[in-house]
Amino acid sequence: MPKGGKKGGHKGRMRTYTSPEEIDAQMKAEKERKKQEQEQEESEGAAQNDMAEEKLPASGSDDSDDENSLRRRAGVEGLIEIENPNRVAQKSKKVTQIELEEPRQLSRREREEIEKQKAKERYMKMHLAGKTDQAKADLARLAIIRKQREEAAKKKEEEKKAKEAAAAAARGINSLSLK
């Protein structure tokens, strides 16, 4: 249950709604006020530029300072000079100033992903060369299996020869008994 125990508004007041006509009137008044402020700033800016040109006719480096001072500051910012080294001023760049050829800064995740891929490639190269512990264990296992297969093949060959000799001996006995 909300504060006060009632479902209504704050302290029993009735809710008031603005009509669409009132909203339109407020919007028009605000637009007119903004136009007047812009016109006023433009006229003041032109007067200041004329005065600055009269004072320093050959100052080329002060152009950027004039632009920063003419920039509209909200609230107390115009009254107090702030010297915060951590504050980054938003500078808009023109399309001609943007350099597409300069290397882009990678994020931490992208850097870690690239490092991970490179480490995996290095490991695979060493593994194929037989320099890792796992590769050495695999090669040792393969050597044992080859040896077992060779022994099994020799044993099979000997059994085959023994069968052939037994068969030949049996044929020899059969041929003697027939005569």
Image (cartoon, rainbow, N blue to C red):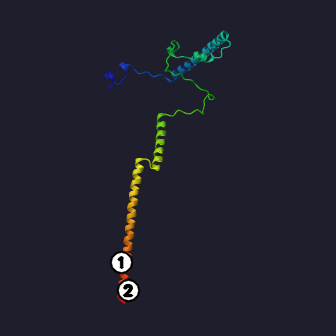
Q: Quadrant of residue 153?
A: bottom left
Q: Amino acid at mark 1?
A: Ala
| Label 2: how many Cα within 10 Å (few below 14, some 14–19, many 20+) | few
In the rendering, at what x and y percent does residue 124 appear?
46, 47
Report which residue position mark 2 lands on: 175
Q: How far across and how far down the image is residue 104, in percent?
A: 55, 33
Q: CA distance from mark 1 to mark 2?
A: 14 Å
How many discs mark residues in the rendered view? 2
Whichever of labels 1 and 2 marks the residue nearer the N terminus, that label is 1
Residue lying at 39% horizontally and 62% vertically, measured from the top left:
149
**Above or below, 53 relative to 146:** above
SS label for mark 2: helix
Is 136 rendered above or below residue 83? below
Q: Quadrant of residue 159?
A: bottom left
Q: Residue at x 48, y 36 (%)?
A: 111
- Residues 65 and 11: in front is 65
Give the residue displayed 49% in from the left and 34% down from the top.
107
Report whether 31 appears left or right of 136: right
Residue 156: image quadrant is bottom left
Could you say which is closer to the camera, residue 148 or residue 43? 148
**Residue type of the residue flagged with mark 2:** Ser
Q: Secondary structure at mark 1?
A: helix
Work out which quarter of the rendered image holds the C terminus and state it.
bottom left
Give residue 166's mark.
1
Q: Where residue 135 sits in the image (x, y, percent)?
A: 42, 50
